[in-house]
Image (cartoon, helix red, strand yellow):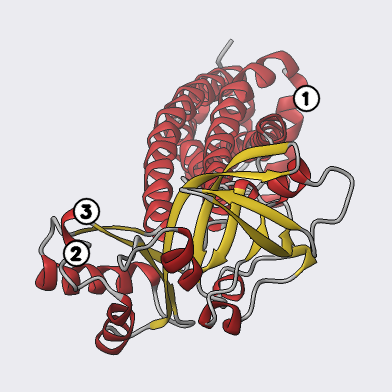
Amino acid sequence: MIIENIKLAFNAMRGNKMRTALSLLGIVIGVASVVAILTIGESASQSITDAIAVGGLDMVTIYPSAGQRNTGIFNEEFSTMLKRDVEGIDSILPQNSSTARVRVGQESTNASIVGVLSDYGDVLSLEYTDGAFFEAMDNINRRQVAVLGADIAETLFPGQAAVGQYISLFRNQAKNYLVVGVLDKKDPTFSLSYNNTVYIPYNTYGQRFIRTTNVGAFVVKIADGYDTIAVSDVITEYLDDIVGTDGYSIFSPASLAEMADQITGTFSSFLALIAAISLLVGGIGIMNIMLVSVAERTREIGVRKALGASPSVIRGQFLIEALTLTILGGILGVLLGSLLSFAVTNLMEWSLHLSYASFILALGFSMFVGVFFGWYPAMKASKLDPIDALNYE
């Protein structure tokens, strides 16, 4: 019976192609809008997360405030204390940074000079075009060695190898540093440009480049299996107890990624809700075509009732016809929405992440629209009097 009713539905659609197309248009546009908006929103959110992930979603950076740097709290022992008292920390790297002029012969440029420990490269998973990061003994012995960002190396050593050569760093006076490694080109993240940075040993920075016992920042790597945001919250509470809320600032790419995901998710859901209104408009079109169909097929209904068709059979016939229309429109809408999503994400240079949940949601809602707006015409058809229907002109 269901198969037969579906065949009748397609026969009715073929008999009124233009009217069917216009009725389907509202469903197609509504479903395509919902699918496209949710898919584009998901793709935008994932692309933002991917961009933020370059900075390390398992990283938290603590910046002591200027007033706390001489209190003796944020010193090198702070790393040991924090790791001991807060669970979920894999490693803590102190670092200092400033800017300086870097020169080789007649070539010179401004660069960010960052003093770090020897395991900094491993913790941040840095990659190299040549050489490697400096070693622990370089830091212990305060050796004047350096690792160059890709742009610095290209500027100072155009067309030649930088490893094994010397650069001059200008602060109060020029000092020569042996280049031991050159980083691969890497996209900048937030305030840090890897390509325009010179890394030197932490002890060398504090005793030979700029004499200081302060620590400018602590890079905290969260251990595997722990939630970065949860550990970050614990660190925040811990620091609040020690130095107060004004004694530091903390930055976590994971928190930023979560915030971006919430914003894009809320915005996409809001737009999808608005787009769903067009599905309701399409539903009104479905009701209209079904009422016209009932009127045109009144004699047919009378004949079927005279031959013994029950009201439930007649009702089922028109409900299935309405459902067939909306399901067909839903499928076409999903295809159109996917094509629109592909076009937009390709134009914006985002990675495409199809929202399969939106497919189910849009198709499910279109079926609901079919039942909701097809019910009244179906009930009207099932209640027709057979004699009146047969005499209908």
Quadrant hosting residue 242: bottom left
Q: Is residue 182 above or below residue 307?
A: below
Q: Label 1, on which residue?
A: 14
Q: Earlier in the sequence, mark 3 or mark 1?
A: 1
Q: Is residue 194 at least partly visible in the picture?
A: no
Query: Of discs 1 and 2, which sits in the foreground?
Result: 2
Mark 3 element type? helix
Q: Nearer the viewer, residue 55 or 198?
A: 198
Q: Is residue 352 above or below residue 121?
A: above
Q: Nearer the viewer, residue 309 or 181?
A: 181
User: In 3D space, how far apart are the residues under numbered discs 2 and 3 (Cα atoms)?
Assistant: 8 Å
**Residue at (39% x, 52% y) in the render:** 256
Query: Of discs 2 and 3, which sits in the foreground?
Result: 2
Residue that protrudes farthest toward the top in the picture: 393
Q: Is residue 360 above or below residue 266?
A: below
Q: Label 2, on which residue?
A: 70
Quick check: marks 3 and 1 in contact, CB under 8 Å?
no
Mark 1 element type? helix
Mark 2 element type? loop
User: In 3D space, how far apart are the residues under numbered discs 3 and 1 (Cα atoms)?
Assistant: 77 Å
Bin the neighbour count of mark 2 within 10 Å (Cα to Cα): few under 14, some 14-19, many 20 and up.
some
Q: Nearer the viewer, residue 178 or 379?
A: 178
- Total number of numbered discs in the rendering: 3
Q: Earlier in the sequence, mark 1 or mark 2?
A: 1
Of the numbered discs in the image, which one, if any, rests on residue 66?
3
The residue under label 2 is which amino acid type?
Asn
The residue under label 1 is which amino acid type?
Arg
Indicate the position of residue 367 as horizontal and vertical percent values.
Answer: 53, 43
**Residue at (72% x, 34% y) in the render:** 346
